[in-house]
Image (cartoon, grey):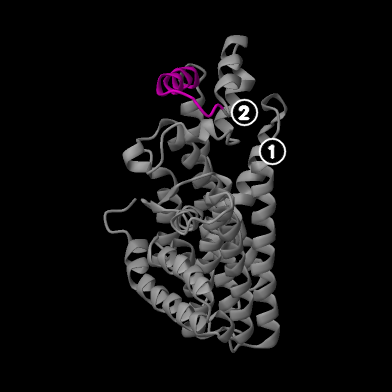
Amino acid sequence: MTDNPKWLEFAAKVQPKIATKTAEQLKEWRGKKHFQYPPLQQDIDIYQALLNGGKKMRSTLAMLSYSIHSGCNLPTKIGEDTALTVASLWEVMQSSFLIHDDIEDNSDLRRGLPTAHVIYQRGYEEQKGPLDSKHYGNAIAINTGSLGLVRIFTALGSIDMPATQKVDITNWFAEVIEKTVAGQRRDLTHVDIKDLSVPDIYRIYHGKTAMYSTIGPLVLGGKLAGASGRDNLNLNSYGVNTGLAFQLVDDHLGLFGDEKETGKPVGSDISEAKKTLHIVEGFKRGSAEDRKLIKDLWGNQNVKECEIEQLRVVMNRLGIKEEMLKRANTFAIRAKNVIPNITANQDHAQMLAEIADFMVVRVN
């Protein structure tokens, strides 16, 4: 990372604009006639809480890509105000994913606050409803998460832009959603640990993380600026590598990180049987005793801190900890190697390099 990160300067300018657009989305959503029903207004409250938090990094990536490809005043370039409106919908999509993801991970907290399904569950308990409160909370939260995905396409339909471009951008949202859900399905599906392979893990990383966190917003920005197909291929390549680096480091922090910094219990990925390269490589390389430990702990809801420490020792001994960080760095380097194909502008190139570095600097 440089001493004067231009990426952070850019983000500081763009994120308030994104926040303004998400507020406009919420206001318009609330005003819809068929949402004038208190429970549905509560559902929008859930989105408001999520949209008010977070760093809005994905929509900011979209606007950086838009900025990079806007210099030539391409004939199909969409104005900045419209681009910001479309980019803000990426945040709605992210919020929808988070609502569903928290149910799938059985998470009670998100950014230190109760998750959507917990809010609904507690409200139902206060009303002393006759049904199982946990099931009720999950059911309503699933519905709320789905509302956000529908909202994206309703909003896209009302945005003024050329018809062919609107179809292209709408199709891109749909493709990203579909591939992300497919990646999540791969991650959630039970597979015996001995049957997991490295290509399996990379498919999961690509689908559940890179597609909507890096590839998706970067290509969206290119489409908004009217970038060429070749430009979008380069954005895709950069996005794949930064996305894979990010997920590798995220998994690394899930096992070796500091709970105070990561915001989630260290070892939770193990108890939740998350499919990671650490687990696959450890099981492949370990002795019979090592494999037994990994198999016993992976998916164990009652895993103890001392057992996680045992696993860390094994991963260190097998060289997994060091190698995973090297792989993440390799992906970051590959991403930076694509930058000259994306832009010749020095400031833009520096920002893209800083983003690639950030994906791995979190462990240093």
Q: Secondary structure at mark 2?
A: helix
Q: Secondary structure at mark 1?
A: helix
The amino acid type found where label 1 is placed reads Asp
Give the CA separation, mark 1 to mark 2: 10 Å
Identity of the residue drawn at 47% across and 40% down: 249
Mark 2 neighbour class, 10 Å CA radius: few under 14, some 14 to 19, many 20 or more? many
Contact? badges 1 and 2 (CB < 8 Å): yes
Q: Which image quarter holds the C terminus?
A: top left
* In the foreground, 168 or 25: 25
Query: Is residue 134 depicted above or below 93 in this figure?
Result: above
Name the residue carrying label 2.
280
Give the image location of residue 274, x and y in percent: 57, 36
* Magenta range: 300-315
Give the image location of residue 298, x and y in percent: 57, 26
The circle on residue 200 is: 1
Q: Is residue 5 left or right of residue 270?
A: left
Camera sees residue 241? no
The image quarter containing residue 57 is bottom left
Give the image location of residue 147, x and y in percent: 60, 69
The circle on residue 209 is: none
Query: Is residue 310 depicted above or below 108 in this figure?
Result: above
